[in-house]
Image (cartoon, coloured by chain):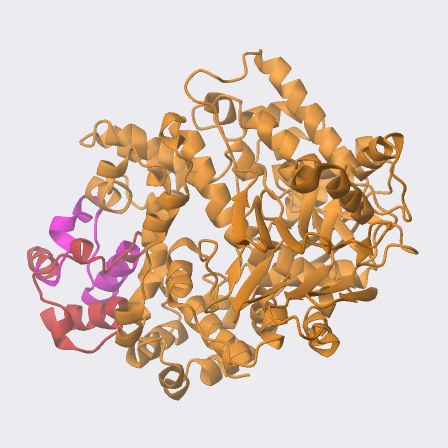
Chain colours: A orange, B red
Amino acid sequence: MCGIAGILNKNTNKNVSVDRLKSMADAIRHRGPDDEGYYVDDYVGLAHVRLSIIDIENGRQPISNSDDTVWLIFNGEIFNYLELRNELLSQGYQFKTKTDTEVIVKLYERDGLGFVEHLNGQFAIALWDTVKKKLVLVRDRVGILPLFYKVENGSVFFASEIKAILKAMKSSPAMDMAGFNQTFYGWSPLPPNTVFEDVKQLLPGQMMVVDKNGMQLKRYWDWSYPESDQYIDSSEDEIADTVEQLLIDATKLRLRSDVPVGAYLSGGLDSSAIVAMIQKYGNVKLRTFSIGFKDKGVDETRYQNLLIEHLDSSHSSLTCHNEDIALNFRNTIYHAETPLVRTAPTPMYLLSGLVQKNKYKVVLTGEGADEVFGGYDIFKESKIRRFWSKNSHSVFRSLLLKRLYPYLDFTKHSSVSYLKHFFGSNFDKSEEPYFGHMTRWDTTSKCQDFLSEDIKRIGTNEYIEMLNQQLPKNINKWHVFNQMQYVEARGLMSGYLLSSQGDRMLMAHSIEGRFPFLDHNLIEYVNRIHPNQKMKVLNEKYILKKAVANLLPSVIRARKKQPYRAPDIPAFDNLIGKEMIASYMSGDAIKKNGYFEEKKVEMLVNKAHKGKAVGFKDNMGFVSILSTQIWHDLFVNK
Amino acid sequence: MEDKIRAYVLENFLFTDDQNALVDSESFLEKGIIDSTGILEIIGFIEAEFNVTVEDDDMVPENLDSVNNIVAFLSKK
C-alpha cells in the first residue's frame, strides 16, 4: 500500500502550493516510507508516498501516459495487472514501467471511466485528465482502502487519511455530531460521514468525477444477492470445489510481489485456510505472524501452534499484555483517527509492528471470510431470533440462544423473560434487513448514556434512516440471511474491521494487508450460493469448511468460533492505564471537552477501579470515553 | 433495604447519585438500565449484600426487575 493526497484547485490563477502538498504527504509518511512524488499544474496537485512492492526501481508515482495528458496516483494493488498488461500490449499499448499503476493509466486511455470494471484488487485511485480537466477518485469495491475528501471554497482536498487533509486546512477540525453518534451505535459512521465535520469519505465501490459539470458520485459495484430461486444450481461437492479453486486463485494472485510476503495466523479457520493455501500453492517460503494474549480468556495460542507445526511455518509471535494495550492506545487512536468502542485495534497495531521488525512489508490475512460466508455469531443469533419470532411465546425457541452464548446459561431454567427482553425485542422488525443487527446496536448505544446533555441535544443518530436510503432497492427480495450479510459487509466490515482494525493498524507500521476472501470474483460467486449451504442449521461457514477440508487438521475445522477480542477495562488496570485515566478522564478533562457527563464518567471510573465494571455497557462506555478524549487531544486541541 | 438497592443501581448502572433518576417501581428492563450482563451483576450484589442465595427459580423479572420487586423478593427469603 501507499498514501495519496491531492488538491483540485478552484482558484486557477496560481499553481497548487507544493509546500502544502508536501505537508499533506508528510502526515501520511508511515503509509509510504520508501519514496515520494508530486505533480502540480494550474488546476491540480497530486502527492504520493510509496511503499515499494512492485517494480521497486521504476515504480515512482505519479505515473503518466506517454504524452503526459493523464496523471495517476494510487494506493493499493491491482492483482490481475499482469493479465491486463498482456492484453493491453497485444492491443498495441506501450509501457514505460512494469507497474500495476501504469496498467490503470492505459486502461483509462482505452476504456475511459469503465477502466475500473477490469481491476481485481484493493485500491484508492486519483486520476487527473489534463485535457478534459477531469479529476476521478475511485475507492475499491469493498472498502479495503480509504479515501477521504473535503470541499472547501470550491476546492477539493482528498487523501488516504484525514490527517493529511487537516494539514491543508487553516481552520481547526471539529467533531461531526452525526458521525460521532453513529460510532456509538454502529461502531463507525456510515459513509459518507466521518467523525470530522465537513470531511467525507467515498463509499466502497464508489467513483467521484469532478469536471466542468460539477461533482458526480456513482456506485460502480455493490454487494448483490439472488432474488428467490436464482441460486447456483450445482451439487454441494461441485460448489465446494469451485469455492476452493476461486480461493486458490485469489491467494495466488495476492502473492504477486517483488518483496517477500507473509501471513497473519490467528488459529481460526479463515487465516488457517489462507496459510495452508500459501503453503500448498504458493511458491514462497511460508512466514507467519500472530499475537497471543496474557489474558487466557481471549488467547488462541494453542491453535496457532498446532497450525505452525502442521504447516512447518517459520513463525513469529508476540504476547500482548494488558499494559501493552494501555501503552499503545494513544497511537492507536492517532492512526484510527476516530473514537473506538473496543481496544481490539491495539493488538493489531502491535502485530503489524512485529511484521515490520522482521522486515516484511506484506501480509495476507483471513479478513472477510465471516462476511462472505456468514460466519459470525450474529448470523446464528439472527437465525434463532427469527425462528423465535415466528412463535414468540415458545420457551424452547428462546433456549437455543444459550447454545450460542454460554454466559447466558447461568440458570438451569429458562429466565425466558430476560432472554426475551434482551434478544426477543424488535420482533416487529423481523422482516427488516437490519433485524439481526439491532441487538448489537442496542447494546452499543448504551454508551450514549454517558454523553453530556448538550451533546444529546445536538447529536443525531439517524443510522437506520441513512442505512435505509443506501440499501439496494431490491434487498427485500433477497433471502433474509443475505440481507444481513449485506448490512454487515457495508457496516461493520468496511467501517470498522477493514479500517480501524485493518488498514489503519497495518499502515501504522508501513505494512500492506491483502485479503483473499475479499477477491470480488470469489465474493460474486459465493453470493450466489444458497444461505443454507453457508449456514447449515447452525453450522457456520459450512461450504467453506467443506472446501478447505483437505487442507486443515480437523481440530481447526471443528473449532468453535472464537470472536477476536482484546481486554477493554482490564487493559487499563495498571500504572500506565491509571495515568491515562487520571489525565484524560478526570473531571476537569471531561468537563473541558464537553462530550460526556462529568459525574457519570467519575462513577464509571470508580466502578472500574473497584474491579466491578464487567458489563458490556461499562467496557464499551469506558473505551468510548477514553478514546474520544484522546481523539480530541490529538486532532482538535492540536 | 430500598435505599441500599436504589443506591447500588444508581451508582452502578445509571452512574448518578441523583435520587430522582430512579423510581422504585420502575422496570430496569423497560428503562433500559441493564443489559444482558447486568443481570449477573445484580444477582451478585444481592447475594453479597443481603447474604441470600438467588436460586434458579428466583431469576425472573418479577423478583429482580425493579427496586420494589427486589425488596419484595428479599422479604420472602
Q: Residue at x 22, y 45 (%)?
A: A421
Res A360 → quadrant: bottom right
Q: Where residue A408 sits: x, y (%)? A: 33, 45
Side of A563 where A446 appears, left or right = left
Horizontal side, residue A75 vs residue B76: left or right? right
Residue at 34% over, 37% down: A401
Residue at the spot 74% in from the left edge and 75% down from the top edge: A18
Q: Residue furthest bottom?
A: A588
**Which stretch did the figure color magenta?**
B39-68
Q: In what quadrant of the picture does the C terminus of chain A appear?
A: bottom right
Residue A143: x %, y % from top left: 58, 48
From the viewer's side, name the closer residue of A538 and A68.
Answer: A68
Can see residue A619? no
| Nearer the observer, A163 or A607 | A163
Residue A164 is at least partly visible in this image = yes
- Figure quadrant of the N terminus of chain A: bottom right
Which residue occupies the foreground of this view, B72 or A144? A144
Q: Residue at x 52, y 71 (%)?
A: A153
Task: From this view, report whether residue B2 is shown above or below residue A234.
Answer: below
The magenta stretch spans residue A620: no
A546 vs A563: above or below: above
Q: Quadrant of residue A419?
A: top left
Q: Is residue A554 above or below residue B9?
A: above
**Residue A207: x, y in percent?**
58, 47
Q: As drawn, is A451 to the left or to the right of A256?
A: left
Is B55 a magenta residue? yes
The x and y percentages for residue A383 are: 37, 31
Write down the quadrant of residue A92 in the picture: top right
Name the chief secondary structure element in magenta. helix
